Image (spheres, helix red, strand yellow):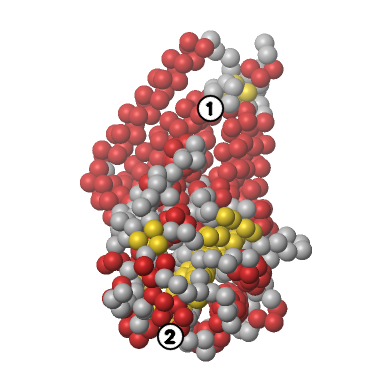
Amino acid sequence: MRHQDRVTSAAGGSIERLALLGSVFFVAFCNPNFWQVMATPDRLARASGWAFLAASAVALVAVHFILLSLLLNRWTWRWLSPVLLVATAFAVYYMTRYHVYLDPTMLRNVIATDVREARDLMAWSLLPYLLGYAVIPIWWLRRYRVAPRPLGSALARRLMFIGLAVVLGAGAVMAVFQEMASTMRNDKALRYLVTPANYLYSLGRVAVGSAKTADGKRAPVGEDAVAGARLQAAGKPVVLVMVVGETARAANWGLSGYARQTTPELAKAGVINFADVTSCGTNTETSLPCMFSALGRRQYDEDRIRGSESLLDVVARAGFRVVWIDNQSGCKGVCNGVESLRTECAGGECMDAALVDRMKGVIAATPGNLMIVLHQMGNHGPAYFKRYPSEFELFKPACAVADLARCEREAIVNAYDNAIAYTDHVLAQALQELKTLKSHAPAFLYVSDHGESLGENGLFLHGIPYAIAPETQMKVPMVMWLSDAFRQRFGVRAGCLEQRAGQAVTHDHLFHSILGLLDVQTQVYEPVMDLAHACRSAS
């Protein structure tokens, strides 16, 4: 008998038994957030509520048993079981610590996380989770042995148990169908709290989506794009600098009425502040492709957005040099068709001021029309204290660790506000460079990709599914500045634009507003979505 097939007295059995034990372990111990939502005071106060919770547990055990039965076999169980346990330990930690939902978008975020971002998310408080949810169960697994069975017999047995799980799971759901249907209908994101089914399903969705775009081909957008009459007219070339902020929320933006003045330099810079701006998503993986897409949130389709060209491709067709300069984890496919640069600093990590230095070099080397996108590190959490130099620690005490649970909320907010104040300084630096520019007619736009939760209702960071996300994760700051030369060139009335800034705006306006500002003529342009359309004089 082969070693891996021995049955020992210490622990032994079948794959089916292992799948059942694993399912019970996952459902009972790895879903605290889910059971916290399900075990409402009303349900706990009535017998039918306890019956509902029991039926839900049976259904979830059945679902996980089916999943594990499909994944585990005599060739995979020995290595795949530990992988699932470790992944689940991480999932439980971050879900309980930051109240995140592991939907496909969040999984895509996780996969795209670079080393420095991952390092910020590691904390000593993770160790007990790894010990309890992974190390101890893996130690037990090492003693487990699977009894050998002929392949045909093993397959028949597996199908029989899967069929039994389907019957039991369906029966449990039907027993409480009315309340179950109502619960899932009212809280569709609840399914993304069920671990490990949530990340297994989401990982599958991400894999399928990635396979669709694996060939790198993107559907063309604005193939008819040309320079309009104003853009072709004689005069200085134009340069638009667009800064994409990271995790800055409108609630802490000084220009938008925050109690603290976190934007003192911009307050003196003569910018137009848009105080009511809604993001396209609650995380970078969603918002960044969406805000540069013609579809936007109005026609949101992740596969179409990721599989299509972006605003940058359209602007490039009209004769602009388009350059993306990144100080973050990449452009999420937005800049695939244009020139892309990264900041470079000793030690590997740059403060956002490095973006301004790269911007100056690109402008100096470009005699023609130019669009630059600066992608900030901004307020990327949870290590807010790493996002600004020590001289910008204006609000104290500031949380100086990445494990936010170790800090008072006041200290967390202070660190976050310090990072906002540093962004204010970086933006003011960029503006100053543009205001003294003689070679081009400059314009400037800043907008954050999404907001952040700072402890409101127990939530931290971002990434809550859009349908149930709090405003703090969706409302973002945005400012605009147009030089006199730029306004005269394109006939934009500043007073009119200031009035428009007082109205509601979304990321969906960006695509069309930038095409309008730069006088890029194309059929995909929608005047009604151009913030400056009504403020532009007739040519």
Specify the quadrant of the image occupied by residue 358: bottom right
Give left or right: position of 352 versus 521: right
Q: Residues within 10 Å of mark 1 (few under 14, many from 20)?
A: some
Query: In the picture shown, does residue 144 fall above or below 266?
Result: above
Three-letter code for the amino acid on which mark 1 is drawn = Leu
Q: Which residue, given by chain and number where applicable, does mark 2 sit on?
A: 257
SS of the residue at dot 2?
loop
Query: In the picture shown, does residue 537 fall above or below 341?
Result: below
User: Marks 1 and 2: CB-CB under 8 Å?
Assistant: no
SS of the residue at dot 1?
loop
Give left or right: position of 414 versus 531: right
Q: For residue 160, say whether it is visible.
A: yes
Work out which quarter of the rendered image holds the C terminus and state it: bottom left
Give left or right: position of 38 versus 462: left
For the point 50% across and 74% down, which residue is it?
Answer: 236
Work out which quarter of the rendered image holds the N terminus and state it: top right
Q: Residues within 10 Å of mark 2 (few under 14, many from 20)?
A: few
Tell me residue 118's x, y (percent). Answer: 63, 55
For the point 60% across and 61% down, which residue is it?
Answer: 326
Tell me residue 365's x, y (percent). Answer: 63, 65
Q: Which residue, given by chain and number where applicable, does mark 1 sit on?
A: 72
Query: In the picture shown, does residue 378 fall above or below 175?
Result: below
Q: Nearer the viewer, residue 277 or 500?
A: 500
Q: CA distance from mark 1 to mark 2?
A: 56 Å
Q: For residue 249, say whether it is visible.
A: no
Q: Nearer the viewer, residue 39 or 447?
A: 447
First-in-chain label (1 vs 2): 1
Three-letter code for the amino acid on which mark 2 is drawn = Gly
Tell me residue 520's x, y (percent). Answer: 38, 63
